[in-house]
Image (cartoon, rainbow, N blue to C red):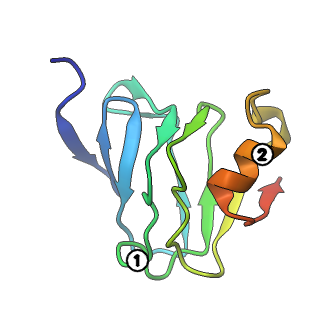
Amino acid sequence: MEHTTVTWEDNFIFRGNTIIRAETNRETLTIPPGLSGRTITTIGEEAFHRRNTPNLVNVILPDTITTFVGSPFMFAHSDLRVLTRKRSLPNAWDDFFLRAALLTRPLYLY
């Protein structure tokens, strides 16, 4: 079966094109557009849980992210800011989608 292997690279555990967990003690983490030759398009449920990212206050999303599974930032640090470039917001990221995925966390455009 394709894309079933779980891989660890940099600060991310991912399967296929999906980040399933981030682990870091850094304050800022930039999600790369690709890992191990695969384009990262999806962030999985609770991928940024504070037990694995205790100091994280800034997550920078690449232009390649098109999908959030559930609420990837639900149990993140209470001060977490999610940043992206305005031009990277896909049309599919409507207001409902953003509210559900970010759980009322603001999405900062830079």
- Viewer-proximal residue, 18 or 64? 18
Residue indicated by mark 1? 25
- Tag on residue 96? 2
Q: Say whether marks 1 and 2 touch (CB < 8 Å).
A: no
Most extreme residue toward the top is 1
- Viewer-proximal residue, 98 or 23? 98
**Quadrant placement of the N terminus:** top left
The type of residue carrying mark 2 is Phe
Task: Say which residue appears at 49% left-offset and 81% top-offset.
Answer: 55
Image vertical order of residue 11 relative to residue 40, above or below: below
Q: Does dot 2 land on a helix, a strand or a loop?
A: helix
Task: Say which residue appears at 62% left-offset and 81% top-offset.
Answer: 78
Task: Say which residue appears at 17% left-offset and 33% top-offset.
Answer: 5
Residue 7: x percent and y percent?
Answer: 22, 41
Q: Which image quadrant for residue 4?
A: top left
The type of residue carrying mark 1 is Asn
Q: Specify whether 45 is left or right of 23.
A: right
Identify the mark nearer the N-term, 1 or 2.
1
Task: Say which residue appears at 51% left-offset and 56% top-offset.
Answer: 72
- Viewer-proximal residue, 74 or 40? 74
Image vertical order of residue 92 relative to residue 76, above or below: above
